[in-house]
Amino acid sequence: MTVEISGITPPARFARLADALAASWQSIRCLPLSRFQHDYCQYVLTHPGAAPSTADLITRDGELALAFTLPDGVHVLRILPAGLPRITSAGCGRRP
């Protein structure tokens, strides 16, 4: 799996989705998020079914893209299978 937080962390690779989720939470939890954003990101990345539900989402949509706002603007956490190109447009859509 490849994980990147736009404008914050470069892409990193993980062999297991569970490790990618845990590392993502460790990176995001220290950011100056609003309480709502913090709680939402925590839930998405750490709830008991996070790995299977994220795997289903990635199978369906090609990646998990979780946007959040910091004082300097919008950032996006992306988790996708290693080797796939990133979607760089801000628009909605699915991978071909």
Image (spheres, grey):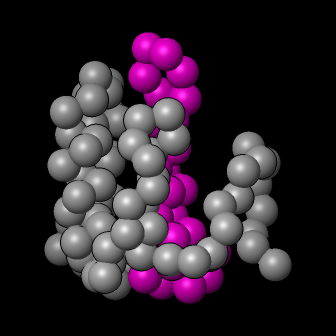
| Relative to 15, residue 28 above or below | above
| Relative to 28, residue 78 above or below | below
**Residue 70, image x and y in percent?**
43, 22
Whether residue 43 appears in this view of the structure is: no
In the image, 63: left or right of 30?
right
The residue depicted at 27 percent of the width and 29 percent of the height is 31
Q: Quadrant of residue 54?
A: bottom left
**Residue 1, image x and y in percent?**
42, 75
**Residue 81, image x and y in percent?**
51, 78
* Residue range highlighted in magenta: 54-81
| Relative to 36, residue 11 above or below | below
In the image, 55: left or right of 76?
left
The residue depicted at 28 percent of the width and 41 percent of the height is 28
**Residue 9, image x and y in percent?**
39, 43
In the foreground, 15 or 62: 15
Whether residue 12 appears in this view of the structure is: yes
Q: How many marks?
A: 0
The residue depicted at 32 percent of the width and 46 percent of the height is 40
Residue 65 drawn in magenta? yes
In the foreground, 67 or 88: 88
Q: Quadrant of residue 65?
A: bottom right
Q: Residue furthest top?
A: 71
Residue 1 drawn in magenta? no
In the image, 82: left or right of 52?
right
The residue depicted at 67 percent of the width and 68 percent of the height is 85
Q: Quadrant where the C terminus lies?
A: bottom right
| Relative to 22, residue 40 above or below | above
